[in-house]
Amino acid sequence: ANGGRPAAAPSARRPGRGPRRASLQVKRVDPWSVLKLALVLSVALFFVWLVAVGVLYGVLNGMGVWDKINNTANDLLQGNEPSGDPLISAGRVFGVAAIVGAVNIVLFTALATVGSFVYNVSADLAGGLEVTLSERE
């Protein structure tokens, strides 16, 4: 009777009502997924760390700070003897920065994983994190 067209579907939201909301509790966090995500993020932050150290080293090198520190260290430590390797060099700075970054990767990943275990235990005892989800208007 209406020309073979299907009846109009009712709208998903009724007029006059706000967006749907759902209150949920985060009861458990999977430690394996936390480990993977923390590892990826910490590796990305490792590269950010190395770039930041490189920029800072370059700026201070351009200002001559490292030369002054190396000359002062030579005067204090070696006196009139011929100087060996400088106290601060690019290789040493980036070597130490890489070691600090690698330790940071291991610690960040381990602490995030242990944190997920601690959250799971505390969520069993005290409930969990309550999250309210809502549709966009």
Image (spheres, rainbow, N blue to C red):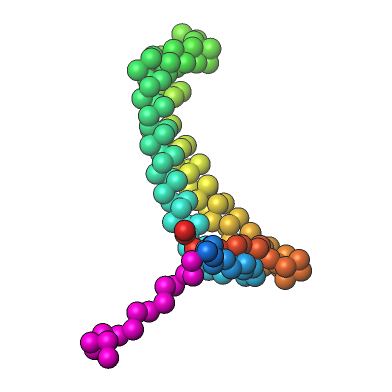
Q: Is residue 15 above or below residue 64?
A: below
Q: Is residue 20 left or right of residue 1?
A: right
The furthest residue to the front:
1
Q: Point out the residue furthest to the top here.
A: 80
Quarter holding residue 9: bottom left
Location of residue 91 by image quarter: top left
Residue occupying the far right of the picture: 125
Locate the N terminus and report the quarter of the image it occupies: bottom left
Q: Classify residue 89 by image quadrant.
A: top left
Magenta span:
1-15
Residue at x 41%, y 27% (from the top left corner): 56
Residue at position x 53%, y 16% from top?
77
Q: Residue at x 38, y 36 (%)?
A: 51
Asked whether the viewer can see residue 42, the reply is yes
Residue 60 in percent (x, y) is at: 41, 20
Residue placed most toward the observer, 24 or 86: 24
Nearer to me, 133 or 121 = 133
Q: Is residue 31 above or below residue 98?
A: below
Q: Residue at x 68, y 65 (%)?
A: 128
Q: 68 above or below 40?
A: above
Image position, residue 137 (x, y; %): 47, 58
Magenta segment includes 11 = yes
Above or below, comparing residue 48 to residue 136 in the picture: above
Nearer to the camera, 92 or 100:
100
Q: Judge left or right: residue 32 versus residue 122.
A: left
Residue 39: x, y in percent?
A: 47, 57
Q: Is residue 120 magenta?
A: no
